[in-house]
Image (spheres, grey):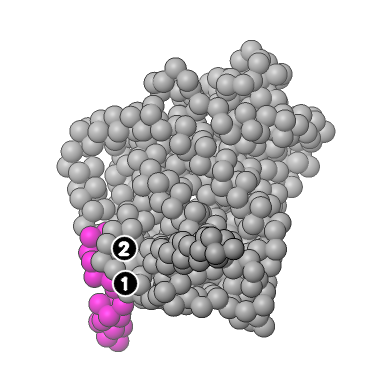
Amino acid sequence: MTGSLIRDEIANLYDEIDTPVFAIGVFLTGVLVSALAFYPKASSTVIGNVNEVITTNLSWYFQALIFALVIFFVFVMVSPWGEIKLGKPDEPPEFSYGSYIMMVFAATFGAGIVFWGAAETLSHYETVPPLVNAQPQSVGAMIGAMQYTMFHWGISPWVNHMILSVPLAYYVHRKDAPMKPSSVFAPILGVNNLDKTWLKVVDVVAVVAAAGGATVTVGLAAQQFITGLSYNYGVSVGDFGIIALVTGLTVGYTASAVLGIEKGIKRVSTFNVMLFLFILVCILVFSPFASIFNLGTAGMGKYIANFVDMSLYVNVGGGQSWVGSWTVFYWAWWISFAPMTGIFIAHISRGRTLKQVIFGAMVGGTAATLPWFVTMGGYSMLLQHSGQVDLLSIIDSYGISVATYPILAQLPFGELFVALFLLLVFTFLITTIDSATISLAILTTSGGTQHPSIANRFVWGVIIGLLTSLLLIIGGVGILQNFTIIAGLPMALLALVTVIGFAYQLEKSRPVLLTREEDWGSSNTLVNWVSSAKQSQSNSDKSTDSD
């Protein structure tokens, strides 16, 4: 019986895949895995050098791009375009709005939030960011650390998940375009012309970038879990332990895959969020919450007042900079994640309006994220500044991934909270790899089927697991950060094309908004629209001349 099921799954995989995209995507990621396995030192050096070139020369592009995207999507949300329905006018959403936001949260930033919650603010407290006029490890540094942490985890990062998800949701659910990144060229080519060979290059780039972004997220969370075992229980996890952890993840995501999105991702995501909120509330109850709120309020004021300056600040002198190491790393990380999260969010957004999708991520996501950073970051700095716990020395000994554990140990029943936090990290790992594998599987199917086979997802789970393990073995968090910026660059370039095309489509739909569906035949493209505009202008000129 088992053999029959395996044969059926392999047959389903063969029938559904877009052969060039699947084969080239697997081949390229396989080459990367092989290079890391057999030439670890050389691979690490190359990744570091390429990362330096990008951050030195293109920080301005990442900064300007994300700032422009924030303005664009906020405008779409508050404009009449926000009322556009993704699907038929009377079609209800598949999930309740609460479940929808929890799935978006768990599949996007969940694992990253629990990793950086205390670690980032402590880092900025020790090494003061630009635009913060304060001495290191001072009260002013505490406010500045909160300010920049809010900037890195507020509205700006969430907009990265809108780059593909909003346009794709529109093209797929209103125009029946395939669920593939190359569908963002629909305004230029028309939905009927999305089968061109060169568009497969776009899909392959998106596949490799998404695999890279997922690897970084899984890697950071895995590193945090491994460090927790070592710091709290003295369990030394070597290279074999890393591989064993990834095997456990594979079992977890496979079980979720068998159950499907409704029973799998939804249930695990709900558990994630409930446990996340429980730990957050408990920390507030047992910590000096008045001081934390004061610090958070001061940081919020600085964040709002300096938002534009932080968004457009770059190191004018060139070379490696604080912005390249922190802000550009974050922007590149989430842009590389855009294909994965874009496919996933578009997949679950049918029946919603553009306003609901954008609001759910940018506003709802920010509202769910910042309280964690205010609480964990504020409490960590207060412990360090008062001398109660020397967190910076602990980080020097165990690495930045240890930051949260000594904080939890200060609470009543600290050992219980440490165990719950380890469970939270592990379940966030499962939801991350689960949503990553379903998105990568969709990306590599012919026509972008929204229900890929388990075999397809299993292939990508193994690839992500191997890539994660090898990156952690050869370089840990540092190599993950360098790899992220490289993976994010191609998607950062594609993002500009995507948003320009989507803006054109929205503008074209304005005269008929909410009144009728646009005709998306092959003739209704940007190229032909320009030709029609020129013809109209010519006719107008002739009429003027005759007058």
Closer-to-camera residue (223/408): 223
Decide if residue 160 is on the left or right side of residue 479.
Answer: right
**Span of residues in magenta:** 1-25
Q: Mark 2: which amino acid?
A: Leu
Label 1: state its secondary structure: loop
Residue 497: horizontal and vertical position, in percent? 43, 53
| Residue at 46% across, 72% down | 524
Image position of 287 with respect to 91: above or below? above
Identify the residue at the far left of this view. 38
- Is residue 526 positioned above or below 350 on the image? above
Please give the label number shown on residue 199.
2
Rendered image: mark on residue 353 = none
Secondary structure predominantly adopted by residues drawn in magenta: helix
Going by the numbered disc 1, the residue's amino acid type is Asp
Q: Which of 217 and 352 lies nearest the eye of the viewer? A: 352
Q: Quadrant of residue 51?
A: top left
Quadrant occupied by the N terminus: bottom left
- Magenta includes 246? no
Q: Residue at x 51, y 63 (%)?
A: 542
Residue 310 visible to an observer of this rendering: yes
Whether residue 230 sits left or right of residue 302 in the image: it is left
Residues marked 2 and 1 touching at CB (< 8 Å): yes
SS at badge 2:
helix
**Measured along the vertical axis of the image, is residue 393 above or below residue 96?**
above
Q: Which mark is residue 195?
A: 1
- Check the picture and name the quadrant holding the C terminus: bottom right
Residue 122: x and y, percent? 59, 27
